């Protein structure tokens, strides 16, 4: 298999974003199960939840980094 750097960055960004989103959703689920389910189901509700509730900063920073890596890998692949 021939892996390119852009593909690796894209996949790592996706993995980081998913892990951060799951961590934030589990944080929401411990406080309010309905909001936790919303974090799992509704796109970008994680961002809304994190702005309203005191979520650890490194959860959101890793989520932003994952999105940035995902976009950068997609742009580099073209």
Image (tube, rainbow, N blue to C red):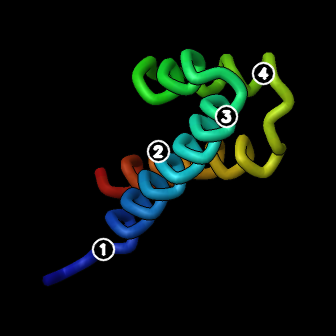
In contact (CB < 8 Å): disc 3 and disc 4: no
Give the Cα separation between the discs numbered 3 and 4: 17 Å
Q: Quickly name the residue at label 3.
A: 30
Which residue shows up at 44% across the image and 18% down it? 42
> What residue sits 32% from the left and 56% below the top?
77
The alpha-carbon separation of the residues under discs 2 and 3 comes to 31 Å
Residue at left offset 48%, top offset 23%: 37
Give the Cα separation between the discs numbered 3 and 1: 39 Å
Mark toward the viewer: 2 or 3: 3
Question: Within the image, what quadrant is residue 48 found in?
Answer: top right
Report x, y in % for residue 9: 44, 64
Of labels 3 and 4, earlier in sequence is 3
| Left or right side of 53 for 8 | left
Is disc 1 surrounded by few (<14), some (14 to 19) or many (20+) residues within 10 Å?
few
Placement of 62 over or under 35, stated as above or below: below
Please tell me whether mark 4 sits on a helix, a strand or a loop: helix
Q: Are marks 2 and 3 in contact (CB under 8 Å)?
A: no
Q: Residues within 10 Å of mark 2 (few under 14, many from 20)?
A: some
State the residue in front, 35 or 70.
Answer: 35
Q: CA distance from mark 2 to mark 4?
A: 22 Å
Q: Which residue is mark 2?
A: 71
The circle drawn on residue 51 is 4
Q: Which is more foreground, mark 3 or mark 4?
A: 3
Q: CA distance from mark 1 to mark 2?
A: 15 Å
Q: Earlier in the sequence, mark 2 or mark 3?
A: 3
């Amino acid at each position: 298999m021939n892996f390119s750097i852009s593909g690796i960055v894209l996949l790592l960004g996706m993995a980081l974003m998913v892990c951060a989103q799951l961590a934030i959703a589990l944080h929401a689920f411990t406080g309010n199960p309905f909001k936790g389910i919303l974090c799992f189901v509704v796109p970008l509700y994680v961002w809304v939840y994190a702005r309203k509730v005191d979520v650890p900063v490194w959860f959101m920073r890793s989520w932003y980094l994952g999105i940035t890596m995902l976009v950068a890998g997609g742009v580099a692949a073209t």
